[in-house]
Amino acid sequence: MTEQTFYRYNPWWESDVRSDNFIEREKILTILKSYLRSKQIVFLTGLRRVGKTTCMKMLINHLIANAGINPAKILYLSLDDYLLKDKSIIELVEEYRKIMKISFSEKIFLFLDEVAYKKDFEIQLKNLYDSQNVKIYASSSSASILKSRKSFLTGRNIVIEVLPLDFEEYLLFKNISLKKSDNHLLDVHFEDYLKVGGIPEYVLNNDISYLKELIDDIIVKDISSFYNVKSTSILKDFYILLMERAGKSLSINKMSKILNISPDSARRYLNMFEDTFLIYLVDRWGKPNDKVLAPKKIYSADIGLRNYITGFKDKGSIFENYVFLKIKGLNPKYVCESEIEIDFITENKVLIESKYGSEMTLKQKELFEKTKAKKKIIISGYRDVMDLL
């Protein structure tokens, strides 16, 4: 049964991998390719169904089609498969080497989806890293699982987060190619993107039930079951409140009062949603004490998911969420003084205020002008974001 399962997961052993029907995401593929020559284990993290599996398949395709790697030297497995539950990662790899007649001195490429489903996965990966000629790419949809195992793999791993499609990738998935003479249509398509968001399957099929199923899966499988939270209805209500507050400062006390739960429970639920990549929390900029005591701002992992919950309203806030996702890698904080806010200041001291169809108030302008930064940018549309990056 194991051999049959292996062949089912690895069709390139018997046929051309390029027959796989996926749209390549060049930006993330370039990042993944850059680590091929390193020994480090590469972890792909991110929201469920954001495309981590597809990213692995893209890299496998590259290895076979462009890098000249023998397909037999590549093993892909989804470790949440019931048929594989009784064997450890080490046992699966040894079985694979036997089936393909590969010695331990020969290099293999391992792609392990949902690796955290295996008990003691971090120790097993460490053993593989230390004792075998292997390059490992692994994925997990839980940030907390990877954080808790970090000490076992210190110096041996790199973590790459796969985000939903950005606007350029959205156009690619929609098969929209505009001539320079049609650049005026970019704004129209960008407005559509702000409605739809970047969950790949939803972008392709526009089936609203897919987003509902995705949210339910994360709440039931990744939060309720994993953390043993009995009331999924409370979790769903909690998520609705989070989305209604996206782009705003979050008050744990207010959340707890609305839902009639303790502040400690509200704080615990918040961490659960963050660990499953449904939300991101942003600290206030300033001294360490300010960061700890000040409320965090919240952003949705995908603007389409937010719109599913709240409806397509408050475009300025949706646009701000989009800007955050574009600059997330720059570790942005928000600026606040006397209840006046500027959206972001990045770790390289770029001050950013997003204004989609609106202008700063007089007090915002004053704070914007007096805040020290290497560069100051007001972003009012898609083109401004592109200039920023």
Image (tube, helix red, strand yellow):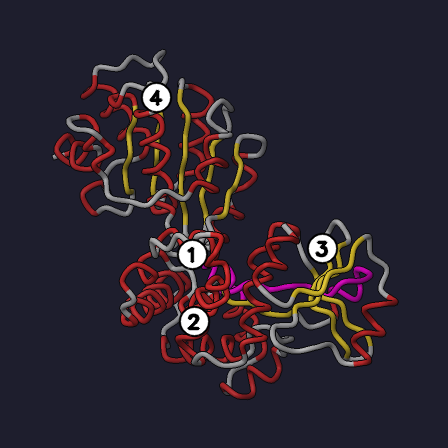
Kindly report the distance in space between the C-alpha atoms of the residues bearing marks 2 and 4. Answer: 43 Å
Dot 2 or dot 4, earlier in sequence: 4
Please determine whether, in this image, residue 195 is positioned above or below residue 348.
below
Dot 1 or dot 3, earlier in sequence: 1
Q: Amino acid at mark 1?
A: Leu
Q: Amino acid at mark 3?
A: Thr
Q: Count up the numbered dots.
A: 4
Of helix, strand and loop, which one carries label 2?
A: helix
Instruction: Say few, some or many: other residues with alpha carbon within 10 Å of mark 3 (under 14 / 14 to 19 / 20 or more).
Output: some
Please determine whether, in this image, residue 212 is positioned above or below residue 351.
below
Task: List x then y, in percent, for residue 297.
Answer: 63, 70
Dot 4 or dot 3, earlier in sequence: 4
Disc 3 marks which residue?
346
Disc 4 marks which residue?
108
Q: Which mark is residue 195?
A: 2
What segment is highlighted magenta in the picture? 271-291
Camera-side residue of 160 and 174: 174
Camera-side residue of 372 and 188: 188
Mark 1 touches mark 2? (CB < 8 Å): no
Residue found 29% across the figure and 21% down from its top: 73
